[in-house]
Amino acid sequence: MLPVFVYDEGDCDPKKCTTKKMIRFHLVQEVGSIRRLPYGSIVLNPMAEKALSPEDIPRAKQHGVVVMDLSWANIDKWPEMRHDLAQRGLPYLLAANPINWGKPMRLSSAEALAAAVYILGDKKQAEDILNKFKWGPNFLDLNREPLERYSAAETSGEVVSIMREYIPEAREDAE
C-alpha cells in the first residue's frame, strides 16, 4: 500500500465529503496544514504541468501521495507549495460521484486519490478506497480502460499521449 494523505480545507458539506469518510475509515492520514505535507510527497494538483505516471512510483512509495480537498469553486486559489513537493495532475477521467457524475475531471477527493494509486500500481488500494462509497465501484467501471492504459505507460509524456485519445475535442481535431 502506498502512503496516502489528505489536506482538508473544510470547504464542503461534511455529510457529502469523501475526505471525511476516508479519514473515518482510516484510509488516509490527515495533514493539518499545508506546511505539514510530507517531505517529497506527490501532491495532486489539477493545474500541474506534469501528469502523474508510473515513473512517480518510487517517490510515491517513499514519500506518499497527497490529495488536496479544496472546493472546485475555489480551485483558482490553489495554495503555495514548498519546492520539495512534486505536483502532478491526473489525466482525463470521468467523475462517478453523484454531484458531478459523467463530468470530465470533476473528481471527488476519493476518486482522485483512487485514480492516483491505481495509476501508481496499487489497484487493490484504489478499490478499497472506492468501496466505501455506494457509487465508488462505478468510477472504476466508467474509467477502467483509460486507468489500465495510464498505469501501463512509463512516463508522463506517454500518459498525456494516451489521455488525448479520450478527450472529445482532441478526437474531433484528429478526424
Image (cartoon, rainbow, N blue to C red):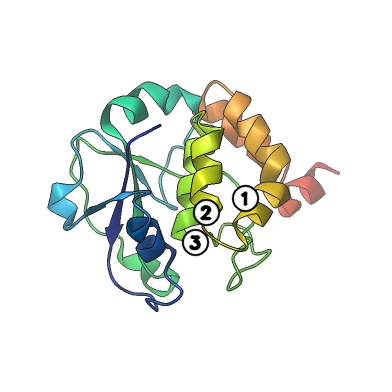
Most foreground residue, 124 or 66: 124
Q: Residue at x 52, y 54 (%)?
A: 111
Most foreground residue, 55 or 130: 130
Quote the CA–CA distance across marks 3 and 1: 11 Å
Split into 4 quadrants, where in the image is the N terminus?
top left
Circle 3 residue: 108
**Which of the two labelled residues, at mark 1 and mark 2, occupies the earlier sequence position?**
1
Q: Residue at x 44, y 53 (%)?
A: 46
Badge 2 marks a residue whose secondary structure is: helix
Q: Residue at x 49, y 61 (%)?
A: 108
Image vertical order of residue 103 relative to residue 6, above or below: below
Badge 3 marks a residue whose secondary structure is: loop
Circle 2 residue: 111
Q: Residue at x 64, y 52 (%)?
A: 137
Q: Is residue 161 visible?
A: no
Split into 4 quadrants, where in the image is the C terminus?
top right
Q: Residues within 10 Å of mark 1 (few under 14, many from 20)?
A: many
Callouts 1 and 2 close, C-beta under 8 Å:
yes
Most foreground residue, 136 or 90: 136
Callouts 2 and 3 close, C-beta under 8 Å:
yes
Image vertical order of residue 153 relative to residue 115, above or below: above
Image coords of residue 114 (percent x, y)? 50, 46
Quote the CA–CA distance across marks 2 and 3: 5 Å
Left or right of 16? Residue 70 is left
Amino acid type indicated by mark 1:
Leu
Left or right of 88? Residue 171 is right
